Image (spheres, rainbow, N blue to C red):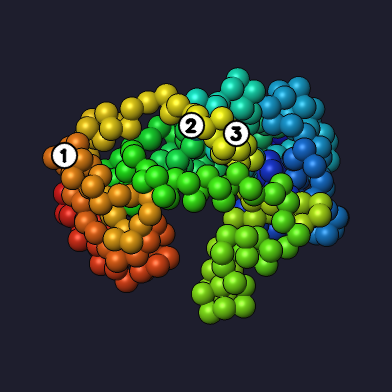
Amino acid sequence: MTRATSDPRAAVVTGGGRGIGASITRAFHEAGYRVVILSRRDSGLAAELGSRAIHMTCDVTRRSQLEDAMARVAGWAGGLDVLVNNAGVSGWRPIEAIDETFWREMVDTNLTGVLFACQAALPHLRSGSAIVNVSSLAGKRGSANNSAYCAATNPGRAAGLVLVDYSPENAPQGAKRVTDTVAAQPDVFPSVDAAMRYFGVEPDSPGGKAKRARFEAYLRAVPGGVQLKRDLHFRDQFRRVKETGERPKLGVDMWQVLGELACPALVMRGAQSDMFAPETAAKVKAANPRIRLVEVAGGHNIAGDNPDGFLAAIGPFLKQLEAAS
């Protein structure tokens, strides 16, 4: 199929109604393209942009829906010049809590959906067209409790590891504090200020003003207020700990994991931390000769309590990794 030079080019952006996808949609629209947003829900962006933008309801995990949508795009625009596979989902769970439904949502959306969209678009792509697949940094760096998402996007690689106030054994005082705080967390906070106060941060204090952006990034708007983006599965786990006294099994021996590390590792311990007991430090160092342990003034949140000390500790380690590469 050919395109008259006077006709605007056409771009399809999956997941193009929100976040990064919305920015991509706006960029193509500003460049003069006809833009089609494919997503499960209409964010209203297409109506805001006007006549050269439309929304089509589509679930990228469904091949038939993608085939139908691409055919409709071709009918509307005369063909397709750009496909941007941007739709993606992420979720956080410890590996022992990942069930088949959770896994399939990650893989079907982030991986299989890309294949289905490319296949559906191929019959309608015009000469000189392009397909852009948006990936994630999760494939370059690991993230706690995010193993399904990392596995679905890219294989993991590590040149070095930094563990901030982490030990396989939590000190009893800190473990109790975290359990009590997380277990009592409500489903919904009435406001960002309320969430900050719950976690011991006064919103109007100098420290609170500095931390507000971090809290806003960690919360999402829901009916009735705001909610932590973290899966409530974690809150419920801590509630079971308080009810039964039994902590969930990790399914892996983290001491063994430390011992098997093949890359250099820097372990920072907060000198005033209630989570990483001083007597555990020697055991961590002995777990692997590649581990270097340093103490930094501050509590469990070293970077927040002492950012200068955090940077002073991590700087030489990063330079060492850079030199080795």
Q: Which residue is mark 1?
A: 286
The amino acid type, in three-letter code, at marker 3 is Glu
Q: Residues within 10 Å of mark 3 (few under 14, many from 20)?
A: few
How far across and down, in percent of the image, does residue 245 sit? 52, 32
**Sequence-wise, which precedes: disc 2 or disc 1?**
2
Query: Most extreme residue toward the left, as rendered?
Result: 289
The local secondary structure at tag 1 comes to: helix
Residue at x 57% of width, y 37% of height: 242
Residue at x 81% of width, y 52% of height: 223
The amino acid type, in three-letter code, at marker 1 is Ala
Residue 24 vertical position relative to residue 133 in the rendered view, above or below: below
Q: Which residue is mark 2?
A: 247
Q: Is residue 220 left or right of residue 160?
A: right
How far across and down, in percent of the image, does residue 281 sit? 23, 47
Q: Is residue 52 left or right of residue 213?
A: right
Residue at x 63% of width, y 48% of height: 184
The amino acid type, in three-letter code, at marker 2 is Arg
Alpha carbon of mark 1 to alpha carbon of mark 3: how far? 35 Å
Residue 311 vertical position relative to residue 104 in the rendered view, above or below: below
Work out whether residue 226 or residue 83 is closer to the camera in this orientation and state it.
226
The answer to which quarter of the image holds residue 280 is top left
**Sequence-wise, which precedes: disc 1 or disc 3?**
3
Work out whether residue 22 or residue 97 is closer to the camera in this orientation and state it.
97
The answer to which quarter of the image holds residue 98 is top right
Identify the image quadrant of the N terminus: top right
- Which label was assigned to residue 243? 3
Do the residues under discs 1 and 3 have CB atoms within 8 angstroms? no
